[in-house]
Image (cartoon, rainbow, N blue to C red):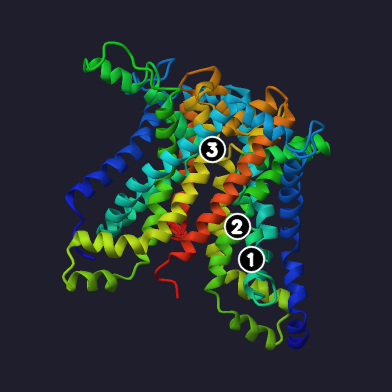
């Protein structure tokens, strides 16, 4: 396996990486341009389009909504997902196999169909407030990631440690918090980050669940692009990219990035 | 204490999974089931919404266009993803982790941002047109946006990183001694590739292909921004029927068609992947 790949293959891989990186570089360049239209390479450097993000109230509001939804949705998904992942591993024999498949379903179903179905049943059908419907949609959107990532780290946990603690007199609930949870801490952090980023970037589920006055950042960007073609969107994009880099740096520090590639 | 805990095993398991189970059933299965069931309760007849869908030339065109875009995206991502994953796997340690990070990063950048980047590149006054004009290759700007090619480029851009990462995982799991045995028994590198590596990678390739196909079959933001109305796909048609025309029956029919096609492909392909796995015992 140590032999070098054929030069043509190396060339193709280099082109693929060029293809992956260049558009992102262009977005950063366009965001820094001093012109009123989108251009690259930037003509005159300026940060005024970054100021413009916060000058537009729709962006200010949707950034806050997006962060609230991503944070709360991830939190709820962890609260219901961690016990589920634990039970799926701990009671593997007692629980039916389809239960594990059930939690992967939100990935199998087309997101846009899911969003439409929630609009029909919750917002229109039951009169659920827009924010609540959005939160429910995002919670379910990220639940599969939470269950899968935490299950993966529980799979390598030795449950006999837990049994030892219980047989020595520790209460099951206390054992979970003092023995099991600290051992899968890395998995919980990874699940949180993956879920948070997924929710923050989501378009398809949010598309139908935004209403008057309540929208998420990606939906607002989409609406803005269709009306104006100025560098504001480029600078919002860069802002989102910085957020991603920051999150990735934290992951790299704590877990190593190969963890996310799994 | 221990004994009581053990006896309650099954019940404890059910209780712990209950909140998540109820959430998935109540907020996902029931609403989607209701959308699909609703399409069969049309006063015009049981299959009326489907008949009017398939009798419309425009809507069948949209369905086939969506399938075509998804298929081409999958094939292109598969070819380039496989070659790239092969190189990434053989890169020396430090470079390898750098290449993996470089593939993860675009994956974590939102779909809107990634589609928007191509809007700047492919637009009428975009970078590509400016470059072509400056080099004198064309005398007037080319119409690249709102074509099927633009949508496919945007989709390949979306899914190549995913393909590279999942195929690196697949290739990594192929035991090295199998390949060494092949070459030490006299097979040429090309023969090792076609007769040993590729057959072993096929189940993983299928899993990657299903991910990309279903992802591009149901994508909304990329076809909306790069394809516009001229390249309407099922996802954009669904949104347009529901939010612009308020045609709820039409929208539900599209939703049902998308769901059935997606789930059929996922189940069929994962069944095939399991059956042809030569490493399965």
Residue at 49 percent of width and 50 percent of height? B211
**Residue B58, position as x, y percentages in the image:** 57, 24
- Tell me the crowding category of disc 2: few under 14, some 14 to 19, or many 20 or more residues within 10 angstroms, Cα based: many
What is the CA distance from the residue labelled 1 to the residue labelled 3?
29 Å
Q: Mark 2 against mark 3, which lies toward the viewer?
A: 3
**Residue A115, position as x, y percentages in the image:** 67, 39
Labels 1 and 3 touching (C-beta < 8 A): no
What is the CA distance from the residue labelled 2 to the residue labelled 3?
22 Å
- Residues B276 and B55: in front is B55
Horizontal relation, residue B100 to residue A185: left or right: left
To which residue does mark 2 refer?
A: A146
- Residues A92 and B63: in front is B63
Please tell me if label 1 and label 3 are on a single chain.
no
Residue at 33 percent of width and 71 percent of height? B175
- Residues B249 and B149: in front is B249
Q: Mark 1 against mark 3, which lies toward the viewer?
A: 3
**Up-down relation of residue A166 to residue B263 (above or below):** below
Disc 1, SS: helix
Horizontal relation, residue A51 to residue A130: left or right: left
């Amino acid at each position: 396996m140590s032999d070098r790949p054929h030069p043509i293959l190396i060339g193709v891989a280099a082109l693929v990486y060029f293809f992956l990186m260049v558009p992102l570089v262009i977005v950063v360049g366009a965001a820094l341009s001093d012109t009123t239209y989108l251009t690259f390479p930037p003509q005159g450097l300026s940060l005024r389009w970054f100021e413009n993000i916060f000058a537009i109230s729709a962006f200010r509001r949707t950034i806050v909504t997006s962060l609230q939804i991503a944070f709360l949705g991830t939190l709820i998904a962890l609260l219901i997902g961690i016990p589920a992942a634990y039970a799926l591993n701990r009671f593997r024999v007692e629980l039916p196999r389809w239960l594990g498949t059930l939690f992967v379903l939100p990935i199998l179903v087309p997101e846009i169909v899911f969003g439409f179905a929630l609009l029909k049943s919750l917002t229109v059908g039951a009169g659920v407030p827009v924010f609540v419907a959005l939160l429910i949609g995002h919670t379910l959107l990220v639940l599969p990631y939470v269950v899968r990532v935490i299950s993966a780290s529980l799979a390598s946990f030795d449950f006999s440690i837990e049994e030892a603690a219980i047989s020595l007199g520790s209460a099951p609930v206390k054992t979970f918090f003092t023995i099991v949870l600290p051992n899968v801490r890395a998995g919980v952090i990874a699940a949180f980050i993956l879920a948070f980023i997924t929710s923050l970037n989501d378009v398809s589920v949010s598309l139908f669940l935004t209403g008057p006055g309540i929208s998420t950042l990606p939906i607002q960007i989409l609406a803005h692009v269709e009306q104006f073609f100025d560098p504001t969107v480029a600078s919002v994009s860069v802002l989102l990219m910085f957020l991603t880099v920051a999150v990735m740096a934290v992951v790299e520090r704590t877990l190593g990035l190969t963890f996310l590639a799994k | 204490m221990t004994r009581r805990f053990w006896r309650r095993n099954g019940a404890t398991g059910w209780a712990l999974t209950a909140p998540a189970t109820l959430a998935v059933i109540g907020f996902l299965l029931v609403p989607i089931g209701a959308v699909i069931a609703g399409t069969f309760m049309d006063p015009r007849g049981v299959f009326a919404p489907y008949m009017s869908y398939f009798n419309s030339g425009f809507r069948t065109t949209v369905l086939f266009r969506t399938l075509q875009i998804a298929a081409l995206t999958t094939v292109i991502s598969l070819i380039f993803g496989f070659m790239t994953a092969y190189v990434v796997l053989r890169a020396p340690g430090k470079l390898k982790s750098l290449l993996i990070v470089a593939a993860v990063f675009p994956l974590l950048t939102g779909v809107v941002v990634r589609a928007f980047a191509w809007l700047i590149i492919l637009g009428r006054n975009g970078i590509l047109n400016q470059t072509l004009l400056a080099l004198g290759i064309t005398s007037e700007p080319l119409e690249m946006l709102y074509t099927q090619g633009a949508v496919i480029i945007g989709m390949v851009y979306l899914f190549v990183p995913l393909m590279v990462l999942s195929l690196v995982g697949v290739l990594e799991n192929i035991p090295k001694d199998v390949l060494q045995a092949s070459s030490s028994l006299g097979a040429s590198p090309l023969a090792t590739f076609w007769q040993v590596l590729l057959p072993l990678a096929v189940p993983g390739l299928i899993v990657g292909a299903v991910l990309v196909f279903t992802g591009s079959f149901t994508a909304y933001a990329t076809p909306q921004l790069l394809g516009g109305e001229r390249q309407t796909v099922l996802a954009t048609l669904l949104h347009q029927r529901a939010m612009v025309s308020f045609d709820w029956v039409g929208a539900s029919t599209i939703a049902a068609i998308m769901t059935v096609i997606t789930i059929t492909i996922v189940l069929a392909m994962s069944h095939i992947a399991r059956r042809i796995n030569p490493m399965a015992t």
